[in-house]
Image (cartoon, rainbow, N blue to C red):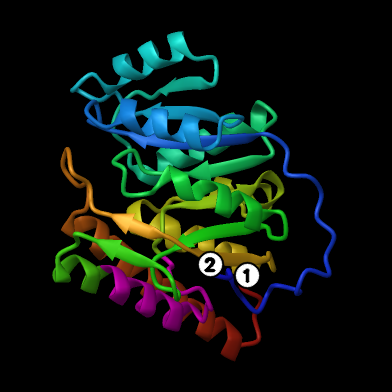
Amino acid sequence: MEPRRTPQDDGGRRKYGPLGSTLVIIPTYNEAENIKPIVARVRESVPDAHILVADDNSPDGTGKVADELAAEDDHVRVLHRKGKEGLGAAYLAGFRWGIEHGYGVLVEMDADGSHQPEELPRLLTALKGADLVIGSRWVPGGRIVNWPKSREFISRGGSTYSRLLLDVPIRDMTAGFRAFRKETLEGLGMEEVASQGYCFQIDLAWRAVKAGFHVIEVPVTFIERERGESKMSKDIVTEAAWRVMTWGVTTRVNKLLGRKNA
């Protein structure tokens, strides 16, 4: 299945530099059952990539398991954080760590197995001609496995709601399986990002489009976690709906008044 390109894509006319080394960032909070198998799958799928486990001081000992993996494998690193501060904060910390340590590609991936490491090589291949690649469930060829209809409704509805309000051509705005070039993240104004959860993913995708970066969506298969508990909550959905509405209204008002969006 061919990647779906946004209107920002220039059909391959732009010259992109080499990708550089890859860092797969895996945020964790109570993922002790999942972290070992997902790290093993990433190592097998992209042997040259390094992995950064960003653990929010998990009470179940995820950080300790990650330390054991790092002690056995020099491709695994662990970033111990003080406590649970949310997905967005964990990724931002991981991005900063990766950029400081010279990685050219920063990948977002969940710890629970919902993102298939075996599909990561396709995202990295697509990134050779893009600034950001999104593993998308809602483009032709993308699919989900073992999700209840209520969860699918929230995800599809959230993406559609965001796409329409923000006037963004990305089909899967809330996707959390992504590959960024370092230069893309440096151009998104990460220091200004305060959103979390679903909203964090929407925020970064919107910023990428506003900044004129070339975004490609690659179809992926999303599989519901088999072990552990989902971090999805009513508060996360509410935050996303409120922030997106605020951003959308502000953008339209600024456009009417002839102001440049921040």
Q: Position of residue 217 (x, y in %)?
A: 54, 66
Please tell me which residue lies in front, 69 or 91.
Answer: 69
Residue 68 tag number:
none
- Residue carrying label 2: 206
User: From which residue to which does the magenta span run?
Assistant: 155-173
Residue 210 tag number:
1
Which type of secondary structure does the marked residue at label 1 adopt?
A: helix
Q: Give above or below for 158 relative to 223.
A: below
Judge whether residue 23 can be spotted in this image.
yes
Please tell me which residue lies in front, 209 or 219.
Answer: 219
Name the residue located 56 percent from the left edge and 47 percent from the top edge.
121
Q: Position of residue 193 (x, y in %)?
A: 50, 51
Q: Give above or below for 59 relative to 74.
A: below
Direction bottom: furthest residue: 256
Judge whether residue 93 can be spotted in this image.
no
Cβ–Cβ under 8 Å for marks 1 and 2 = yes
Name the residue located 29 percent from the left edge and 23 percent from the top edge.
57
Report if residue 159 lies within the magenta region. yes
- Image-quadrant location for residue 234: bottom left
Type of secondary structure dominating the magenta stretch: helix
Which type of secondary structure does the marked residue at label 2 adopt?
A: helix
In this rendering, position of residue 130 left or right of residue 15: left
For marks 1 and 2, give the CA distance: 6 Å
Disc 2 crowd rating (10 Å Cα; few below 14, some 14-19, many 20+) is many
Q: Position of residue 24 (x, y in %)?
A: 51, 36
In this rendering, position of residue 138 left or right of residue 228: right
Please identify the quadrant where the C terminus is shown. bottom right
Q: Amino acid at mark 1?
A: Lys
Q: Position of residue 70 (x, y in %)?
A: 45, 15
